[in-house]
């Protein structure tokens, strides 16, 4: 009802993979969807609650990503080898086969849905497109191992970049999808903020943005008048 009242294109509620899905597009044409929690997903979420949106109806996090690829098996094997994603099920629809992969993250269970599509034209980057998808490496050592594997396969890649808070690597896999791998081992100051509201946690900024702290905090405060810096 909310999407319809705002004039947002949507496909109404559909049945998909023994669940429900509500696919829609934002005003730039980005393809998105809503899905309910599954039994494997936990309650470790921080929903954004507003005057219009209750906790019961709030967005909780990322359920899954859906990637259209020419050659499904190539991307599936890469996700298994590099990120330990395993095949959960394979859907056979009238249009195209779909492989659903799962991870082993006990905190945030998520899925990757690989849609084999040999008919649609290749996406041209621009408004409404998705630039890349990000996955994680445990630490810099694991990131270096992934870079070595990437180099052996001659995938176009950026080399390891120092993002100050973490390090990351970008590469294009066999189907041309741009993937970022970022270290989970971050360089945030380890302080105890347990029990504090998110709005009370100080705003972390990389060094190159430090001179703009006052302007950034003022902008955040104007967007969220009831909050302090984040």
Image (cartoon, helix red, strand yellow):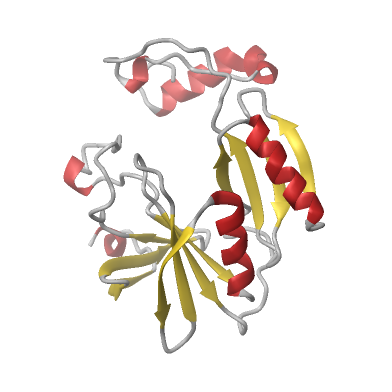
Count of numbered circles in the view = 0
Q: Nearer the viewer, residue 203 or 97?
A: 97
**158 over 68 or under it: above or below:** above
* Side of 227 relative to 211 (left or right): left
Q: Percent position (x, y) of residue 133?
A: 58, 51
Outermost top residue:
191
Residue at figure coordinates x 51%, y 63% from the top left: 29
Q: Nearer the viewer, residue 101 or 198?
A: 101
Snapshot quadrant of residue 50 = top left
Q: Percent position (x, y) of residue 30?
A: 51, 60
Residue at figure coordinates x 57%, y 57% from the top left: 79
**In which quadrant is the N terminus drawn?**
bottom left
Q: Percent position (x, y) of residue 213?
A: 58, 14
**183 over 131 or under it: above or below:** above
**In which quadrant is the C terminus drawn?**
top left
Residue at figure coordinates x 65%, y 19% from the top left: 209
Q: Is residue 156 visible?
A: no
* Side of 210 relative to 115 (left or right): right
* Side of 164 relative to 108 (left or right): right
Snapshot quadrant of residue 21 = bottom left
Q: Is residue 91 visible?
A: yes
Outermost bottom residue:
94
Q: Percent position (x, y) of residue 136?
A: 56, 41
Q: Nearer the viewer, residue 68 or 138?
A: 138
Residue at figure coordinates x 32%, y 66% from the top left: 22
């Amino acid at each position: 009802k909310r999407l319809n009242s705002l004039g947002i294109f949507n496909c109404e509620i559909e049945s998909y993979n023994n669940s429900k899905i509500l696919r829609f597009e934002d005003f730039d044409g980005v393809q998105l969807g809503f899905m309910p929690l599954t039994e494997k997903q936990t309650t470790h979420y921080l929903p954004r609650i507003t005057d219009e949106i209750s906790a019961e109806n709030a967005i909780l996090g990322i359920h899954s990503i859906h990637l259209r690829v020419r050659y499904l098996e190539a991307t599936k094997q890469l996700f298994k080898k590099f990120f330990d994603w395993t095949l959960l099920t394979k859907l056979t629809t009238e249009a195209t086969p779909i492989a659903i992969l799962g991870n082993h993250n006990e905190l945030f269970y998520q899925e990757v849905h690989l849609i084999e599509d040999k008919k649609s034209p290749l996406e041209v980057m621009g408004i409404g497109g998705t630039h890349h998808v990000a996955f994680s490496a445990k630490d810099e050592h694991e990131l270096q191992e992934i870079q070595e594997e990437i180099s052996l396969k001659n995938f176009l890649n950026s080399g390891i970049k120092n993002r100050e808070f973490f390090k990351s690597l970008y590469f294009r896999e066999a189907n041309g999808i741009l993937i970022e791998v970022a270290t989970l081992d971050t360089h945030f100051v380890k302080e105890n903020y347990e029990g504090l509201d998110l709005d009370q946690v100080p705003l972390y900024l990389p060094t190159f943005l430090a001179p703009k702290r006052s302007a950034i905090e003022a902008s955040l405060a104007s967007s969220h008048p009831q909050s302090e810096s984040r």
